[in-house]
Each structure stands twice: as structure tokens, then as C-alpha cells.
Image: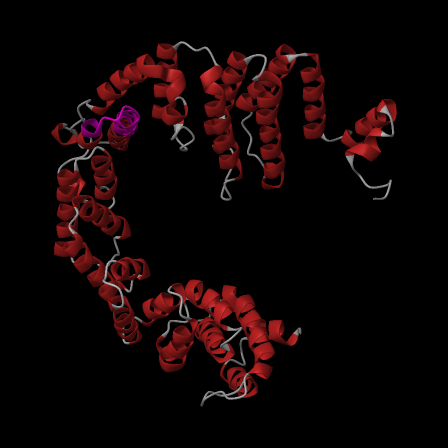
Amino acid sequence: MSKKTLNVKNLAALGAEPLAALLIEVTKGNAAQQRRVRMELSAHQGPEEVALDLRKRFAAIRQAKGRIPRKTRKTFAKELHGHIALIADKISGPAPDEGFDLLWSLLQLADGIFDRIDDHNDILADVFAAAMQALQDLAPRAQVDQNALAEEVFDAVMGDEYGVFDGVVVALSEALGASGLEALKTRARAAADAPAPDISRLRRVPTAKTRDSAAQQDMRRRMAGHVLQTIADLQGDVDAYISRYSAEQLTFHTIAPDVAARLLAANRVQEALHIVEAAQYRQATRRSILGTPDLDAAYIACLTALGRKEDLKTFLLQDFLDNLNADSLRRYLSMLPEFDDIDAEERAKAHARTHHKAESALAFFINWPDMHAAAQFVLDRGRELDGDAYELLTPAADLLEGSFPLAAVLLRRSMVLDALNQGRVKRYGYAADHLRTNARLDAEITDYLGHVDHFDFMERLRLAHSRKTGFWARIDAD
């Protein structure tokens, strides 16, 4: 390795004074880098000094009011990550209580920071997630007043506008201990059970302020209810967890699987099955077209726990027939007598080939996997595939192109035609890439089986979409 390479060994060879001079030079005019260097100097003097500097920096951030510019967002996030690392590496070891308090202070900066920034890419959200993880790692070693901590946790959750403290009860459960969890439960129960204001009884027409106040109180009740459910989970109290839901809510397919999982863990299988079946009935009566994989998985778990093998086989087979669920078919086949599974698999594939939803059928063959059947399906029914289903078609084409290049070409053509026919300008770049890949595969295809070859396809495409100059500029650039 060259002695000019920028690495620790080569830089250390320069000596302390030249390095110090170089550091001053390269950080000149860069406030963030200078702060980082000062923090390291403080850390060298001991945890008390660096803690003092961190508190000063947190105070400055708390008092700042201006918007955080987009161009400085990553730099700011990097600074905060550096503070977390500094607390973990330099303070938490010798002074865990100080480290705990600093991490808590950093988390409480969140609302003020998010008020000053549009964090579309979750850059700052990742910072506070890292701070919460550091706090959770440190909490068992910190000596805290459990009841006082419960008060702080409750206030943080109730005032949380951006979800920063969503996981704080779990993160600090060990630090809270039994006493702190009970104190937190008491505060949360009082908030959750507070009567809702009935604005309909007001003599005057409710004002916007009145409605906002009612909405805020309703939000507090729901947040307190979530705290109670989290504590119930931590204490293994299934009934307390369930009690926060109404009878109707327990039939929701988004809620029933979680409740059933907790009942199953408590060996209350019949109750779990009752919850799941009620949710299934609700879905059936509402004629919902949405899939319910979590609810189905809960039902399978209940039948398995009860040893209802035949009912389970019936459900698995029906799930495959309706939805072409490959996992259900695998489990169904595994329950059949030896050799019966071979014939059953062939019947299943025959059913998939004629399934009314082409995308589901292709996904099944890809996931099974049976690439030969997938390629044949594309040749037989490729025109039925929705070219907008790029999340399925793109990986399918990538998997097929090695052994079945024509099928891969047809899938990519489907996506190209969809992008151009629908004017999906943002996909023009992907469409151009698909055509370049098809041009490469053209040499491997000796028979297009009635489909036009790549040259003729491109000619027809150019004739049909000659006015889409932005697209052709990408093609002609090559």
C-alpha cells in the first residue's frame, strides 16, 4: 500500500504537532467540524467536561428557531449521530447516570428539530431511533428513580408529536422495573379512562378551538391506551391487553391476529380461534377484496394448535385455489400421504395455469419455483399481464432471461408498452433499460414463435410513439 494513502498508520507517522496543525487548517470555517474537535478535546479531559459541552450544544439547538436548510440536513444528522457515539463511548462507561440523562435530553430535542425541518428521507428519524437504542442499551446500568422516570416517560409519550417515543416503554422497561411500570400504568389508566367531552351538548355551535381540544383529548386517550397495552404485554397480562379493544375492534382483520397470537402464547387456543373466526366472518360479510395473510396465518396457527388436521388441509387447499398461495400449497402437500403429493402438485399447477388473475399465476410459478412453467405461462398468456406490475415483472424477467430469453423479452416489452401507452414519464429510463436488455437477448433467440423480432418491435414502437421525444432521446443516446 502506498505511503500516501490516507489511513491511520500513515497519518500517525506525521507526528502529533503536524497533525494538529493540519486539523486546525482543514476545519477552519467549518463550524460542525470544529464543534466535533472541541468535543473530542473535552472528552480527553473526562466525562464531566464533555457532558458540559454537550449540554451547552443541546441548549443551543433547543433555542434555535430558524428552518434547517435542506443542504445542511445530512451534516446536522451526522453531528447528532456523533453526539450519541460520544455519549456511548466516553460517558456511559464511567458515568452511566450522566449518559442516560444526556440521551434523554437529546431525545427531547426531537419535536423542536422536526418543527424546523422536512424529514422526508427519515434522516433525522434515524438519529432519534439510534438515540433510543443507545438509551435502551444503557438503561439497565443507570441508577434512576423509577417513579420519577415513569412520570417523565408518561409526559414524553403524551406530548410526542412525531412518534419519537413510540418504543420508549419497552426500551426502558428494565429501568422502570415493577414499581415504575405500575406508576406508569396508573397515570395511563387515568388518561385513557377520562370521559370524552361531548361537544354536541354545548349551547353554542362548537368552535374550531373546541373541536381541536376534543381531538387532542381523544388522541391522549388513544396514546394512553397504547401505553397500557404495552405494559400488559410486558407483564404478560393478556386480558388487560384485550380489554383496550371494543368487541367490534376485535373483529378487525388488522387487530384480531395480534390478539390471537397472545391468546395462543397463553395456551388459550379456543379463545384465539373464536377471535379469528369472528374476524373472518366480518371479512366475508363485507365482501372485502383485500387479502388477509396475517388473519389466515393466525387461523392456521389455531387449527394446528388444536390438532384439527383435516380442517387445516381443507383451508390450505382452498387458500391455494383462491389465491395461489405457494406457502399454503407446500404445507398442504406435506400433509398428504407419500406419492399422493406428486399428483396433487400437478393438479395444482394445472389450476394455476388457468387462474383468472394472470399476475397471481406468474407469481406462483416464480415463487414455487418452476421457471419452465413460468416461461410457458408468459408465452401462453403473457398478453393478459398488466405491464404496470413492474414489481413482479422485472424480477421475473431477470430470473427467466438465462434459460428462457423470449419469455424475459416479452415481460420487458409489456412494461415498455405500459410506460409509453400510459405516458408514465418517470419510467422512461427503466423502459429504455428494458429495451437495451432485449437488444442484447435478441442474438440468443432463434425463434420468436410468432412474435415480432427486436428490430420490428422497435420500428413499430417508434412509429406508434414518435412524439415521445424524451424517451427516444434516451434510446438514441446510445
Quadrant for residue 84, please give it: top right
Q: Is residue 353 left or right of residue 395?
A: left
Q: Position of residue 328 (x, y in %)?
A: 28, 58
Q: Which residues are magenta?
A: 223-240
Question: From this viewpoint, is residue 435 visible?
Answer: yes
Front residue of this view, candidates 444 and 18: 444
Q: Is residue 21 left or right of residue 257?
A: right
**Direction front: furthest residue:** 338
Q: Position of residue 67 (x, y in %)?
A: 55, 34
Query: What colouring style does the render use?
Result: secondary structure
Question: From this viewpoint, is residue 152 visible?
Answer: no
The relative height of residue 420 versus residue 368 in the rendered view (above or below) is below
The relative height of residue 210 versus residue 248 in the rendered view (above or below) is above
Quadrant for residue 168, please give it: top left
Q: Image point 20% across, 22% down: which residue?
A: 194
Q: Is residue 1 left or right of residue 31?
A: right
Can you say which quadrant of the picture contains the N terminus?
A: top right
Q: Position of residue 223 (x, y in %)?
A: 29, 29
Q: Exactly how many numbered labels are in the figure? A: 0
Main secondary structure along the magenta-highlighted residues: helix
Q: Image point 72% across, 26% down: which residue?
A: 34
Q: Position of residue 368 (x, y in %)?
A: 37, 65
Q: Image point 14% across, 48% down: which residue?
A: 277
The relative height of residue 180 versus residue 300 in the rendered view (above or below) is above
The relative height of residue 435 versus residue 389 in the rendered view (above or below) is below
Quadrant for residue 32, please give it: top right
Q: Is residue 54 magenta?
A: no
Can you say which quadrant of the picture contains the C terminus?
A: bottom right
